[in-house]
Image (cartoon, rainbow, N blue to C red):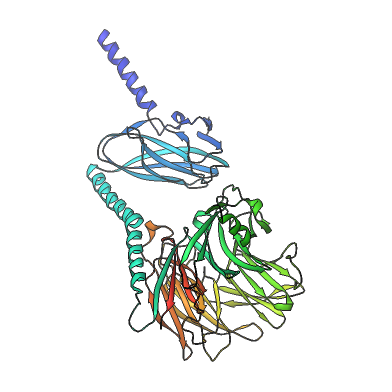
């Protein structure tokens, strides 16, 4: 009887321990010290919330073990604010088996876990706020664990994952090194793409990550290039050492995190140049900068600080703010049109609000008018590319849509009046700038824009790109449309007379694919087109990795323009020259 009593007691304790280690029972989950945690027995579900969190744990299951096999683990719940991740933690090694962002709004998040030997695990929901601030809250209502494979399937899956991990490591670490090594070798040899053309790589300067805009500025006989690096919230300032010399990195301007300086524009003023900056504010998290907007920095102010420091921290108080609005994903590309005695106009595309901010400055004024005219576009237009010219006594702006196959033509006068005068069907969606040039003797100015080839929000899929081109009439209207094919995911176009024949060549930047290095399978390319007998023909191609932005300037000071191209992942500004 005594032995039977001990056996019953052991079995009871064993069953209780099994219950207390069952992750499916959400009543056994616990909250982290900084988490507000409440178990609702009526529903049942867990309500959790926390503030001022970054990647900390929020709630976690009891520890449990799984035998060898393949398991699908699913959570059902709702994220009401912020962002969360769902992960499976190896208790012994204190390392993630797998982790991924959770689905929003009542969705079901699930992971597949292969196990070849018994492991002790824990399920964890953690905060995924990129900016370590703001509220995170949600509910958890159900946990499901299903065995979907045996030990053999788990071993095969782990082997496949190891191969994939090694391939990702190669793309992240080895491939960029190989590409830069090849780039340096091509520059040393001034390699040309083939014997019949005269374009060669001559230089590569280091810049920041994910460059999205570049401008050149000449101030008191000094030549500068500024590059906006949206990926690390910085602007790189390069200076040419002397005529015929190379570009050297002079300083980096670091802006508040997540304000995202994404576009630059030179605004000349007496004895100085103002650098106009679009602050896109990309992340949907709290930011030290605040709103999306447009502001300026004095180049003299920057140069004064480079005397003592090569890294300059820029605060919001250092920026002369011209305009802001609440929200995110706003100020994008900008352009300035100088009309002499008509004054000058500055236009900024507000992507998410589908509008244009139009600033005007009279000929004798030193300041822009206090607030811009905000010109609404069609809902869902999402303007990105913008450029402009003067026609008669008016400024004409051309604005390309990202999510509609459209290009709007806007007319502005010195009386500060602006209106949309026409909308053209471009035949495709675009994330390109707009380039205006004189491509042959049969036409005056023409406009070109790159078409992505598919959905511009999908950077992973390789799409066949193309170009929309049109002539510009004396009144500024677009006429004589044409299209021609280009490379993978055409992302930018620039016009410049590199061969000095009096007519511009059209340079097309084909991004390739991949927002990050792991996704990049098509490296992209650069194509140079010449208009001959009314047709654009490709005369040169460079296999440059992930080209993003083009810039035409006299980089070496010899009186002739060269082409600058930013490389998105390789963090370089490469210079291409026509060599006779």
Quadrant containing the N terminus is: top left
Viewer can see residue 233: yes
Residue 24, compared with residue 360, is above or below; it is: above
Could you tell whether 316 is left or right of 112 in the image?
Answer: right
Residue 486, compared with residue 85, is above or below; it is: below
In front: 357, or 408?
A: 357
In front: 574, or 357?
A: 574
How many dots with numbers?
A: 0
In front: 474, or 222?
A: 222
Could you tell whether 270 is left or right of 442 in the image?
Answer: right
Could you tell whether 469 is left or right of 277 in the image?
Answer: left
Q: Give the x, y percent position of residue 453.
A: 46, 71
Quadrant containing the C terminus is: bottom left
Q: Residue at x 45, y 31 (%)?
A: 29
Could you tell whether 159 is left or right of 266 in the image?
Answer: left
Q: Give the x, y percent position of residue 551.
A: 51, 71
Q: Give the x, y percent position of residue 409.
A: 64, 76
Viewer can see residue 1: no
Residue 512, compared with residue 49, is above or below; it is: below
In front: 471, or 50?
A: 471
Q: Quadrant of residue 109?
A: top left
Q: Give the x, y percent position of residue 162.
A: 28, 49
Residue 482, compared with residue 294, is above or below; it is: below
């Amino acid at each position: 009887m005594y032995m039977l009593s001990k056996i019953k007691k052991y079995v009871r304790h064993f069953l209780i321990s099994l219950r207390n280690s069952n992750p499916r029972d959400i009543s056994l989950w616990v909250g982290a010290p900084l988490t507000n945690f409440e178990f609702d027995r009526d529903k049942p579900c867990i309500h959790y919330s926390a503030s001022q969190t970054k990647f900390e744990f929020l709630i976690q299951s009891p520890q449990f073990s799984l035998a060898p096999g393949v398991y699908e683990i699913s959570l059902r719940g709702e994220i009401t604010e912020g962002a969360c991740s769902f992960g499976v933690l190896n208790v012994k090694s204190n390392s993630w088996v797998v982790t991924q962002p959770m689905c929003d709004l009542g969705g079901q998040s699930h992971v597949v876990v292969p196990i070849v030997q018994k492991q002790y695990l824990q399920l964890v929901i953690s905060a995924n706020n990129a900016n370590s601030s703001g509220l995170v809250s949600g509910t958890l209502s159900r946990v499901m664990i299903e065995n979907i494979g045996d030990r053999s399937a788990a071993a095969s899956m782990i082997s496949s994952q190891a191969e994939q991990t090694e391939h990702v490591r190669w793309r992240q670490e080895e491939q960029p090194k190989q590409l830069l090594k090849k780039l340096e070798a091509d520059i040393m040899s001034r390699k040309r793409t083939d014997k019949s053309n005269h374009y060669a790589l001559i230089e590569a300067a280091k810049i920041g990550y994910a460059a999205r805009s570049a401008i050149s500025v000449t101030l008191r006989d000094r030549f500068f290039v500024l590059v906006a690096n949206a990926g690390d919230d910085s602007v790189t300032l390069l200076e040419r050492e002397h005529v015929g010399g190379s570009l050297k990195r002079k300083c980096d301007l670091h802006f508040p995190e997540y304000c995202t300086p994404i576009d630059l524009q030179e605004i000349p003023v007496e004895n100085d140049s103002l650098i106009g900056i679009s602050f896109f504010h990309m992340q949907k998290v709290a930011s030290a900068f605040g709103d999306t907007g447009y502001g300026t920095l004095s180049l003299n102010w920057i140069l004064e600080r480079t005397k003592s420091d090569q890294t300059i921290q820029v605060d919001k108080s250092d920026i002369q703010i011209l305009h802001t609005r609440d929200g995110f994903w706003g100020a994008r590309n900008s352009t300035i049109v100088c009309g002499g005695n008509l004054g000058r106009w500055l236009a900024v595309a507000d992507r998410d609000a589908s509008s244009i901010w139009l600033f005007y400055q009279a000929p004798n004024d030193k300041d822009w008018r206090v607030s811009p005219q905000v010109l609404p576009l069609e809902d869902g237009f999402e303007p990105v590319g913008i450029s402009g010219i003067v026609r008669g006594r008016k400024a004409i702006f051309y604005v390309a849509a990202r999510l509609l196959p459209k290009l709007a033509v806007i007319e502005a006068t010195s009386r500060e009046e602006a209106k949309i005068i026409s909308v053209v069907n471009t035949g495709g969606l675009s994330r390109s700038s707009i380039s205006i040039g004189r491509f042959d003797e049969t036409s005056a100015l023409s406009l070109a824009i790159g078409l992505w080839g598919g959905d511009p929000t999908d950077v992973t899929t390789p799409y066949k790109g193309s170009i929309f081109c049109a002539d510009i009439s004396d009144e500024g209207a677009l006429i004589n449309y044409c299209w021609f094919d280009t490379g993978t995911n055409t992302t930018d176009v620039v016009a410049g007379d590199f061969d000095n024949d009096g007519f511009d060549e059209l340079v097309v930047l084909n991004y390739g694919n991949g927002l990050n290095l792991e996704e990049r399978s098509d490296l992209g390319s650069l194509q140079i087109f010449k208009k001959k007998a009314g047709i654009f023909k490709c005369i040169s191609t460079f296999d440059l990795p992930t080209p993003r932005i083009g810039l035409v300037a006299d980089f070496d000071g010899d009186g002739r323009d060269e082409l600058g191209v930013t490389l998105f992942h390789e963090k370089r500004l490469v210079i291409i020259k026509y060599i006779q």
